[in-house]
Image: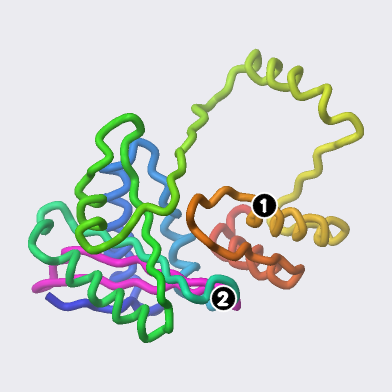
Amino acid sequence: MDLVPLTADDLEAFDRFFGVFDRQQRAEREFPSLSALEEARVLFTRPSTYHEWRGLLAVDDGEVMGAAWLDWPLLENTDFLSAQIVVEPGHRRRGVGSRILDAVLEMACELGRRSLLAELATPYGGAQTTPGVAFAEHHGFVRKHTELHLVLQTPVTDTALATLAAEAAPHHHGYRLVQWGQECPPEWVDEFCALLSLMGDETPMGDLELEAATYTPERLREVESRQTAAWPATR
């Protein structure tokens, strides 16, 4: 089995890489939350000042057996590397995941990252020991934070929206809604950056000790530029 790093110009390899995670999400999550293909491609091919993404494909005789999706911040939390490891169902319990994890740990050491973060999905109210959880615990991972994935089914009825609006009305006197497309209007940039920074700082993180990202106008414009590249039809 070979572990093949992704390259920005190999579109076919990226499609195969993305397919591993897309199939896993659709098979194991009632509400998949993976980025769309073009959005993911921009993450991996468009340089960022604040974050980096890389991928590994596990291939044996031309067949994809698994993959690793890696990312790490470049300004805050410089001790951390996040990794999502997926093994195709037909190749599980054969050491493929362990081999990928070894390569991820080696990369983390090369980058000077001392902590490895991973996210796992477990069914709400169901068994908490899934194959992914068992794999993580076997390799020494410990639970640090738990979140609920809340879903609002759409469309929402007009009656429900009217009820919510009536409940909120006494609490927003003097406020008005402002919205925009791809780019925040210049007059709102400073306030929007402050809110984005505050949101990161106040998000509950359990036992995880993470620095909140500080948004500046330059950082915001870079994020917007990447979003525009990922979704050109919405410009």
SS at circle 1: helix
Q: Position of residue 57 (x, y in %)?
A: 25, 71
124 shown above or below 16: above
Q: Amino acid at mark 1?
A: Met
Q: Position of residue 202 (x, y in %)?
A: 65, 51
Q: Amino acid at mark 2?
A: Ser
Quadrant housing the C terminus: bottom right
Residue 50 belongs to the span the image colors magenta: yes
Q: Residue at x 52, y 27 (%)?
A: 154
Residue 100 found in image quarter: bottom left
Residue 152 belongs to the span the image colors magenta: no
Quadrant housing the N terminus: bottom left
Circle on res. 48: 2
Q: Residue at x 49, y 60 (%)?
A: 39
SS at circle 2: loop
Q: Position of residue 170 (x, y in %)?
A: 83, 22
Magenta residue span: 48-73
Classify residue 104 as left or right of residue 61: right
Furthest residue toward top: 159
Which residue corresponds to mark 1? 199
Classify residue 190 as left or right of residue 142: right
The dominant secondary structure in magenta is: strand
